[in-house]
Amino acid sequence: MDHPKSKLSITLVVDLVRAVDRTAKRRRGASRSSVIEAWLRRAVRMEAEDRLRADTIEYYESLSGRERREEAAIAGAASRAARRLELDDD
């Protein structure tokens, strides 16, 4: 899917510019923009994963003892049910 692009001017330290250029060269002449865009997309994805992980931890830490036992019971039942599943190989 082709996303609309916006032109942006940035200033980077020399070692980052060299890293971008090395990566572009390894990717057989990819543009600096495409390298930086790929890096930024990865950083955004990693940030979202970190946030989800932190939110999940916060949620489970907020549970009362009763709620934790309930969650454990549900997880155990789901695990047992999953082991009984017969999946088609075709």
Image (cartoon, rainbow, N blue to C red):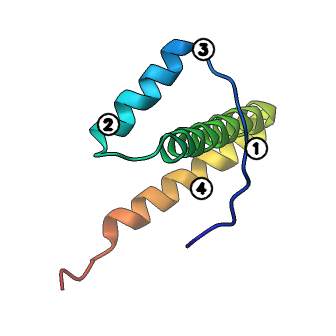
Choose the circle earlier in sequence order: 3 or 1. 3
Secondary structure type for disc 1: helix
Secondary structure type for disc 3: loop
Q: Up-down: is 37 above or below 58?
A: below
Separation (CA) of disc 3 from disc 1:
50 Å
Q: Up-down: is 6 above or below 16?
A: below
Residue depicted at x 35% and y 28%: 22
The residue under label 2 is 25
The three-letter amino acid code for the residue at tag 4 is Ile
Residue depicted at x 54% and y 52%: 75
Separation (CA) of disc 2 from disc 4:
51 Å
- Residue 84: quarter of image: bottom left
Q: Is residue 42 left or right of residue 65?
A: left
Choose the circle earlier in sequence order: 2 or 1. 2
The residue under label 4 is 74
Q: Which of marks 2 and 4 is in front?
A: 2
